[in-house]
Image: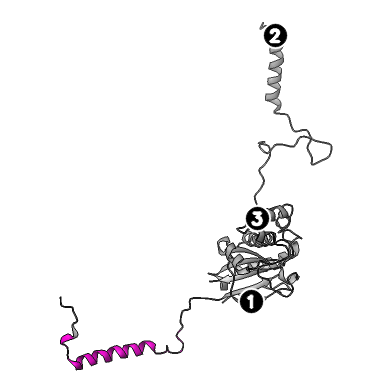
Amino acid sequence: MRSLIDIRHVGVAARLAVAAIMLSGLVACVQPLPAGVAVPTQIVPDRIVVLTVFFNFDSHALRPESSALLDNLVQALNDQRLTGYHFDINGHTDITGRLGYNIALSTLRAGAVADYLAARGVPRELMQIQGFGPLQLMDTANPSSPTNRRVEIVSTR
Amino acid sequence: MIRTTKWFRTGFLVLFGVTIMGPPAIAQSKNPGTTLSPPSAASPYVAPPVRMAVPPPAAVFSSADAEADGAARRLAASLPLDPATRDLRNRLPADVQGTIYQLGLRIPHGSRTDLRGHTPTPKEIVDALAH
């Protein structure tokens, strides 16, 4: 069967011409892009803010002194500049106590923050809560330090 | 003349009285604002509670307090961790990353802005979160 392009009967000069064309195409492909052309990247790094939210001892009930911070957070997450973003609300504890209990408590605390924000107009579908307990210590040299007790808001696109 | 029995006359008077006077009112106590017999929720004389779009701050700050410990215990028991890891006290598991993976948590990767120690303004938060 005869194919559409059969180079057996083509002369040497024609073969060289085809090879040159193919080589020039290859060179064009590997040339650097001109300056100013944006290259889409696969991984967009997160932006994280670390906050101190006050809770009652051994509880996920928010303390009244957290209201000013959380009200500012409501305004921020509803800001036009953050339209189209999703937010992780991550709870963290220090190492004191049982691991499972701390993970659960940090999850409930992240949920309490999300409930507060949702009650004041932040769309719930934009928020995801996570509880790390002590698994992501901020001060690894002092695992019991209060520095490790925190809430982090992560913006993702 | 119509002859009636004593029971008939008594029943007639009771029915007539209820029709004219209406149902008996709830007895009021001597202290204003309280009732001796609290009305049931199904009573047609009790107005349904008004639902608020945003709960008052007092409710938000105190509702979870009473059962927090129990809720955390229940949630801890349901975590997908083996009991030995779950009950580790004051210690991290040998394989922290494996435990995080087991829990299905997503570790954030990126720049971190520490806004602790003060009440950040909305602009500070937006500046830190916007890409």
The percent coordinates of residue B56 (x first, y second) are: 70, 56
Q: Is residue A29 left or right of residue A131?
A: left
Q: Which residues are magenta?
A: A8-37
Q: Are marks 3 and 1 in contact (CB under 8 Å)?
A: no
Query: Residue B75 shows which numbered tag?
Result: 3
The nearer-to-camera label among 3 and 2 is: 3
Look at the magenta stretch and give its main secondary structure. helix
**Nearer the viewer's eye, disc 2 or disc 1?**
1
- Per the image, the residue denoted by label 2 is B5
User: Between residues B53 and B65, which one lies in front from this camera angle?
Assistant: B65
Classify mark 2: helix, strand or loop: loop
Q: Chain of mark 1?
A: B
Q: Calculate the distance from the C-alpha at mark 2 to the C-alpha at mark 1.
A: 93 Å
Residue A12: image location, x then y, percent: 19, 93
**What residue type is disc 2 on?**
Thr
The kind of residue tagged 1 is Arg
State whether residue A76 appears in this view: no
Q: For the point 67% across and 46% down, which residue is it?
A: B49
Q: CA distance from mark 3 to mark 1?
A: 29 Å
Percent across and percent down for residue A135 are 66, 68
> Viewed as shown, does residue A8 lie left or right of A88?
left
Measure how far apart labels 3 and 2 are at the Cα level.
71 Å
Q: Looking at the rendering, which quadrant does residue A112 occupy? A: bottom right
Outermost bottom residue: A13
Q: Which residue is mark 1?
A: B112
Upstream in sequence: badge 3 or badge 1: 3
> Is residue B54 located in the magenta-colored stretch of the structure?
no
Secondary-structure class at tag 3: helix
Which is nearer the N-term, disc 2 or disc 1?
2
